[in-house]
Image (cartoon, rainbow, N blue to C red):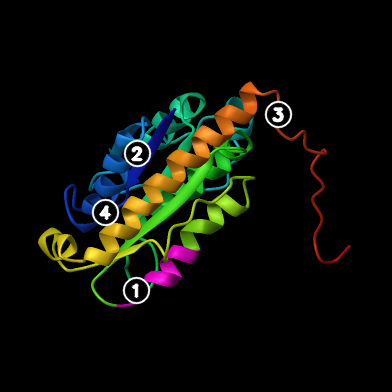
Amino acid sequence: MKVLLINGSPHEQGCTFTALSEVAVTLNKNGVETEILYLGKKPISGCIACGKCSGNGHCIFDDKVNQVLDMLDAIDGIVVGSPVHYAAASGQITSFLDRLFYSGSSRMAGKLGASVVSCRRGGATAAFDQLNKYFTISNMPIVSSQYWNQVHGNTPEEVRRDREGLQIMRTLGMNMAWLLKSIEAGTQAGVKRPVYEERVATNFIE
């Protein structure tokens, strides 16, 4: 079992990384392999709706989106982390996730999803809600915690003093490990994954 944690902050080892690391340590203690992927500081292109990914499953912009697409078959869960910018997720991770889910949505089904946000003071629940929408449109069960998955602080040191926030991260890690093991046990017992109907797409003028 493996979980990919995506750091959408411009700071490689800042507040978002501190929160994701707390989740990763708990997953590791529960026998789940983890990898933290830092998106970096370079600009990430948004989706240009060219549709090329529908043919080969890869984005025309060859960056970390394609790196994750190549890893998908080996990943059982995804935790997306972002700082709060104007009550929303960072531009970096928004562009990244738009392209990742547009090109790989059909391969996301059944994987566990969770989001983590870091903020100084406010806007956390709005950003949290934004990130969870990628999962709910892709047949991905969302992993919750004892409270909304957020930490507060302006520096990693301040986040480490957010005792409740760090406990939320640990609870999230425990819940994700438990669900992964439950799915594995169910699969071994013969429980089959859902077989979905052919997708119907309509618009509001029909």
Q: Residues within 10 Å of mark 3 (few under 14, many from 20)?
A: few
In the displayed image of the protein, which residue is found farthest to the bottom?
A: 122
Compared to 70, does 158 lie above or below? below
178 part of magenta stretch:
no
Residue 19's disc number: 4
> Disc 3 residue type?
Val
Q: Residue, x 45% and y 44% (percent of image)?
A: 176
Q: Is residue 203 left or right of residue 46?
A: right
Q: Is residue 142 left or right of residue 66?
A: right
- Tell me which label, 3 or 1, sits earlier in the chain: 1
Report whether residue 202 is seen: yes
Q: Looking at the image, is mark 1 or mark 2 nearer the viewer?
A: 2
- Tell me which label, 2 or 3, sits earlier in the chain: 2
Q: Which residue is mark 1?
A: 86
Q: Quadrant of the N terminus?
A: top left
Residue 8's disc number: none
Mark 2 to mark 3: distance in Å?
A: 24 Å
Q: Nearer the viewer, residue 122 or 51?
A: 122
Q: Which residues are magenta?
A: 122-129
Q: Position of residue 110 (x, y in %)?
A: 61, 37
